[in-house]
């Protein structure tokens, strides 16, 4: 085998053997196959795709490229949740404490912002002192005592994915369904969990903007998990507009805290409780979705989930006082109201453009090395279908830098559209697939 031979085979539409995929990934990790070889192969996969058997082999190699977490000593079933990325998607900080409060062990590995989508780790690090990379011994201790940990990917967990993702980002091959499947599951299956709940986004703010592509990705994930004997639920949720009202790191943590205290936008509640209920059912704490949904709701209404979030923050060295006093979170120096220029109904609230606007303010990153401002972002006062009076505030802009504000304003103007008649509502939950 040679790198050129493997690349040429996929370039010409051929199907790789398991041995060829192992040769490629192991050689890449050993620096025997170069970045330019891998970049060429990634583009060949992006153009020609992979068979389900190839995706399974690639996922196995990604999982086995580093350490595999051994959680067998922990009691109960372990269930993780993953989202394919969205705008205002702060569900990880909500569902982890809910599921843990219901008796599920949640070893949640999550990531940082890149492009127009937010990153869970960046949001959590807006909490003073929060440590996103606890040691393996600390992770085990937190899972035994609190039931949930929310952490970043360690250097030795699926290292092939980390190196390949960096190349995918700069070679315009991020949106490949086989590569997304292997990237997500390579990390998640290295945790050796008993079950996974995956939130696949569909809409303008998603990597998979069409329902067809979202369903293809969901089916690919389910097929691999079935073959690897891991229980899986994939929920396809809407990302045509941002989820909830807050976009930006500290603003989203504040909204999570409000949620756990019983004050939440309806869309965020629907999606969060659906994901949490599926985790509770996969974790063996309920037999039916009806029973699991009731347990999730009770965990919030009794304060048990808020207390669990407090304990997660404390054990990961964060300032737990934030649960009772969100004003501890970073604040922007300026808050500017963005008014409606006409009356009618909000018919467009474009998630991608609003995510890009939040990035322009400094809330996200376009390159891995970019610095994030945890205080800035947007807070939506109106959502799709809401009636609007001329001059009424559509959103609040939390900003620190005048130049960044001027870059964000055209994106916000383009994202928010008012018409005389309301548009047709899109469902929040498009489909649920299980394996």
Image: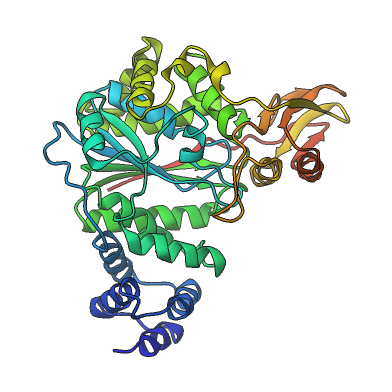
Tell me if residue 137 comes above or below residue 328 in the rendering: below
Q: How many marks?
A: 0
| In the displayed structure image, the side of residue 418 where residue 89 appears, left or right | left
Report x, y in % for residue 392. Answer: 82, 21
Q: Quadrant of residue 387?
A: top right
In which quarter of the view is residue 198 placed? top left
Reply above or below: 291 against 211.
Answer: above
- Above or below, 357 against 318 in this view is below
Query: At x 39% / y 38%, what residue is drawn?
Result: 132
- Which residue: 26% across, 74% down? 22
Residue 279: x, y in percent? 30, 33
- Which quadrant of the view contains residue 406? top right
246 to the left or right of 78: right
From the viewer's side, name the closer residue of 363 and 21.
Answer: 363
**Which part of the image, by quadrant, shows the N terminus?**
bottom left
At which x and y percent is residue 228?
21, 56
**Colour pattern of the rendering:** rainbow
Q: Nearer the viewer, residue 107 or 66?
A: 66
Relative to residue 399, is residue 221 drawn left or right? Answer: left
Q: In the displayed image of the protein, which residue is found farthest to the left?
A: 73
Report the front residue among 430 and 122. 122
Q: Between 34 and 224, which is closer to the camera in this rendering?
A: 34
Residue 248 seen in render? yes
- The residue lying at 35 percent from left, 76 percent from top is 31
Residue 226, position as x, y percentages in the image: 24, 54
Look at the image and tell me whether residue 198 can be seen: no
Q: Residue, x 23% and y 55% (percent of image)?
A: 67
Q: Horizontal placement of 9 versus 324: left or right?
A: left
């Amino acid at each position: 085998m040679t790198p050129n031979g493997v690349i040429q085979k996929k370039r010409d539409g051929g199907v790789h053997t398991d041995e060829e995929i192992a040769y490629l990934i192991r050689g890449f990790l050993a620096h025997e196959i170069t970045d330019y070889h891998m970049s060429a192969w990634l583009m060949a996969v992006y153009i020609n795709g992979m068979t389900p058997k190839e995706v399974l082999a690639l996922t196995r190699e990604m999982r086995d490229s580093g350490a595999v977490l051994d959680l067998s000593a922990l009691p109960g079933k372990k269930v993780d949740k993953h989202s394919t990325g969205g705008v205002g998607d702060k569900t990880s900080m909500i569902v982890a404490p809910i599921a843990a409060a219901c008796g599920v062990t949640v070893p949640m590995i999550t990531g940082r912002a890149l492009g127009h989508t937010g990153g869970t780790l960046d949001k959590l690090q807006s909490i003073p002192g929060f440590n996103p990379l606890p040691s393996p011994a600390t992770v085990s201790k937190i899972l035994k005592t609190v039931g949930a940990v929310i952490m970043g990917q360690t250097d030795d967990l699926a290292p092939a994915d980390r190196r390949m993702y960096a190349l995918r980002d700069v070679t315009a091959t991020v949106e490949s369904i086989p590569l997304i499947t292997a990237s997500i599951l390579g990390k998640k299956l290295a945790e050796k969990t008993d079950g996974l709940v995956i939130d696949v986004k569909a809409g303008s703010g998603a990597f998979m903007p069409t329902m067809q592509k979202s369903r293809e990705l969901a089916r690919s994930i389910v097929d691999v998990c079935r073959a690897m004997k891991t229980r899986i639920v994939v929920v396809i949720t809407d990302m045509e507009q941002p989820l909830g009202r807050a976009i930006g790191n500290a603003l989203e943590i504040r909204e999570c805290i409000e949620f756990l205290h019983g004050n939440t936008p309806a869309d965020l509640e629907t999606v969060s409780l659906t994901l949490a209920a599926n985790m509770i059912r996969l974790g063996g704490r309920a037999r039916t979705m009806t029973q699991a949904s009731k347990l999730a709701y009770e965990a919030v209404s009794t304060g048990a989930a808020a207390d669990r979030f407090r304990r997660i923050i404390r054990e990961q060295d964060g300032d737990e006082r934030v649960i009772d006093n969100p004003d501890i979170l970073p604040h922007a120096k300026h808050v500017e109201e963005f008014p409606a220029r006409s009356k009618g109904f909000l018919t467009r609230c474009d998630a991608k453009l609003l995510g890009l606007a939040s990035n322009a303010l400094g809330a996200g990153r376009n390159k891995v090395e970019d610095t994030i401002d945890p205080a800035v972002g947007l807070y939506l006062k109106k959502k799709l279908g809401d009636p609007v009076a001329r001059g009424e505030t559509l959103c609040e802009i939390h900003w620190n830098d005048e130049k960044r504000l001027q870059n964000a304003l055209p994106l916000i103007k383009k994202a928010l559209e008012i018409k005389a008649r309301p548009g047709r509502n899109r469902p929040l939950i498009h489909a649920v697939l299980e394996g």
